[in-house]
Amino acid sequence: MQITRKVTDDIVWVGCNDRRLSRFENLFPIPRGVSYNSYLILDEKTVLMDTVDGSVTQQFLENIAYALGGRSLDYLIVQHMEPDHCANIEELLYRYPKLTIVGSAKALQMIGQFYDMDIEGKTMAVKEGDVLNTGSHTLRFAMAPMVHWPEVMVTYDEKDKVLFSADAFGTFGALNGKLFSDEMDFDGEWMADARRYYSNIVGKYGMQVQGLLKKAAALDIQVICPLHGPVWRENLEHFVDKYDKWSRYEPEDKAVVIIYGSIYGNTEAAADAVACRLTEAGIKDVKMYDVSDVHVSELISEIFRCSHIVLACSTYNGGIYPPMENLLADMKALSVQKRTVALVENGTWAAASGRLITKELEEMKEMQILDKKLSLKSVLKQGQEEELEAFVSQIVEAM
Ligand SMILES: Cc1cc2nc3c(=O)[nH]c(=O)nc-3n(C[C@H](O)[C@H](O)[C@H](O)COP(=O)(O)O)c2cc1C
């Protein structure tokens, strides 16, 4: 049985949901699943926008056959060559032998790298500004390298004013019958995963996303069709605005995220004391996470959201407690910048975590490290009350 949804009069969502995959890219936990979106344009010529992951091929082929209603498939546009979007090219060529594959030169080259199939004479390489006329639709291609791979392009449908945005504007989460963001409580149920998707998958490429946003700003876009998650047809500015903020590495909220790495619970207790004092000082949005317990992708997502960060960390074999070290490596890799950070360090004989974390933060761009470090010798002591007050006050003042 087909599972499809209409996007416009002659554009159909033929994508699939995956609720069985536990980790996206074998890395990011996706308890809410993920959707692989693909769209079919039913014009004088028929056009498929990308394919899906190999795990859902059968459902995908059924969706396409139904939506085509006996017609053949003329074009497959490959915007992105990551295997979760291109696993079905060969199968489509078997079923629709007259198919022409359209993509950037790099995408067409990657097809040969991933798959042993003969596509000679069946491809059309396109570049910036090229158009494909399919009857009433004119599809215009714009290159979007490194959003999120180098071969990526996006496609603008001039008739329905749809931007097929590849991985940009994507979100983790399976679509449970609801395709459009206006059919769901996006801010309440989806935004956290949208942020986690952006910050961890595309976060490193803020500059390239800014480039794409500039191109998009010149177009009259009524609908955004990404390769993962909901389609946007209302209140587009809301999500575009988030993308703009995220890609400029500007925090969304005046908020403090406290992330602690603690072996026996004493550094955690100090982090707790900091959270209490911040709340008493009137800071409403204070969140606490155990770096050993919460997946690093969630922490990165919170770091993208919050303006201020407290890192509280035990010293471990003369170094940074390993899960905290891992977070710092991820922050660096994902180009985290423009945040204010305060540090709590702990060590029983030679505390080094504060100094070492400072060194890591100094390698990131525009990170303001607050002067007063809260230093513990095993445990936060009653006698450190004043020190604690001063530590918290500097965060409040910085806000
Ligand atoms: C395996 C291990 C290695 C440690 N290495 C150091 C160290 O190199 N320097 C130091 O001052 N403390 C070291 N500590 C002590 C921790 O920093 C200690 O757990 C901390 O001071 C107490 O805070 P906690 O209860 O949050 O873990 C180590 C502890 C463990 C278990």
Image (spheres, rainbow, N blue to C red):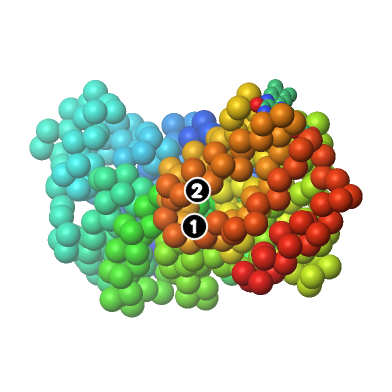
| Tag shown at residue 367 | 1
| Tag shown at residue 67 | none
Q: Position of residue 119 (x, y in %)?
A: 17, 33
Near mark 2 (Cα within 10 A), the count class, few <14, some 14-19 or many ≥20, is many
| Quadrant hosting ligand 1 | top right
| Tag shown at residue 361 | 2
Q: Secondary structure at mark 2?
A: helix
Is residue 57 among what the camera can see?
no
Mark 1 to mark 2 CA distance (whole Å):
7 Å
- 108 left or right of 71 in image: left
Q: Are marks 1 and 2 in contact (CB under 8 Å)?
A: yes
* Amino acid type at mark 1: Met
Q: Secondary structure at mark 1?
A: loop
Q: Residue at x 24, y 34 (%)?
A: 111
Q: Position of residue 200 (x, y in %)?
A: 49, 47
- Above or below, 104 against 278 in this view is above
Quarter the N terminus occupies: top right
The count of marks equals 2
